[in-house]
Amino acid sequence: MKITAIKAQVKRSDRYSVFVDEKYSFSLSSEGLLESRLVSGQDLTESEVADLKRKSADDKVYGLALRYVAIRLRSRYELETYLSRKEAPPELIERILQRLEHFGFVNDETFARSWVDNRRLLKATSRRRLQMELRQKRIADDIIRKVLEEDQTTDRATLMELVAKKRRQTRFQD
């Protein structure tokens, strides 16, 4: 079996189609292509092609995970659940999570800080509700406690802000 062509994909310029014996066989990301060191004219065995096809599938799942965390920060649990819904095998999920944690894309403490900051910015939210939301995201209790202790906003200040907002509405003037 011989690699006859490696072409950039039209719709996804970061992925490359690999043709074996004049037929499309699999695709790889630019990073995956560099790691595998494939070149046109290279001879491959059937087991090598099968291994590259598996690597192609793993590469696609990793790309999905990257796009998912690029939208907004995610907790480890959210990303794990997302990859499970995409039917990725558990050992691949763990490898992807470790890789993303290594690069700093998945960090529960950073996620929790960001979540609290955004919720405080967008809406008056009590500490108890923030704690509940973070628990739903499966953030560890010690991280929740630490992040909420760092947060300077008190429930009293949040309540005062909410009352002031309501008083500005015409139906609550009296």
Image (cartoon, rainbow, N blue to C red):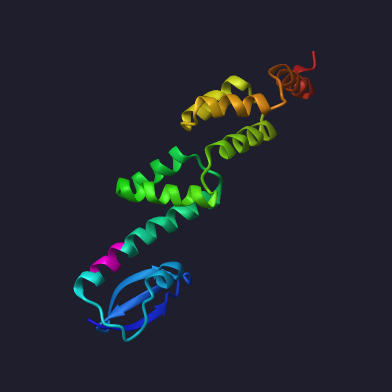
> How far from the left and from the top, in percent, is residue 97?
43, 47
Classify the position of the C terminus by image quarter. top right
> How far from the left and from the top, in percent, is residue 82?
40, 45
Is residue 61 visible to us here?
A: yes
Q: Is residue 101 above or below residue 33?
A: above
Count of numbered tags = 0
Q: Is residue 84 above or below residue 130?
A: below
Q: Is residue 31 above or below residue 141?
A: below
Classify the position of the N terminus by image quarter. bottom left
Q: Residue furthest left?
A: 46
Residue at left offset 75%, top offset 24%: 165
- Quadrant of res 9: bottom left
Task: Tell me if residue 64 is in the magenta stretch.
Answer: no
Span shown in magenta: 50-54
Magenta segment's dominant SS is helix
Q: Residue furthest top?
A: 174
Is residue 124 visible to us here?
A: no
Asked whether, in this view, residue 37 is left or right of residue 168, the answer is left
Q: Nearer the viewer, residue 173 or 48?
A: 48
Q: Nearer the viewer, residue 168 or 36?
A: 36
> How far from the left and from the top, in percent, is residue 164?
78, 21
Residue at left offset 50%, top offset 50%: 102
Residue at left offset 38%, top offset 75%: 37
- Quadrant of res 44: bottom left
Asked whether, in this view, residue 157 is left or right of residue 48, the answer is right
Q: Nearer the viewer, residue 78 or 121?
A: 78
Residue at left offset 44%, top offset 44%: 79
> How far from the left and from the top, in percent, is residue 36?
37, 71
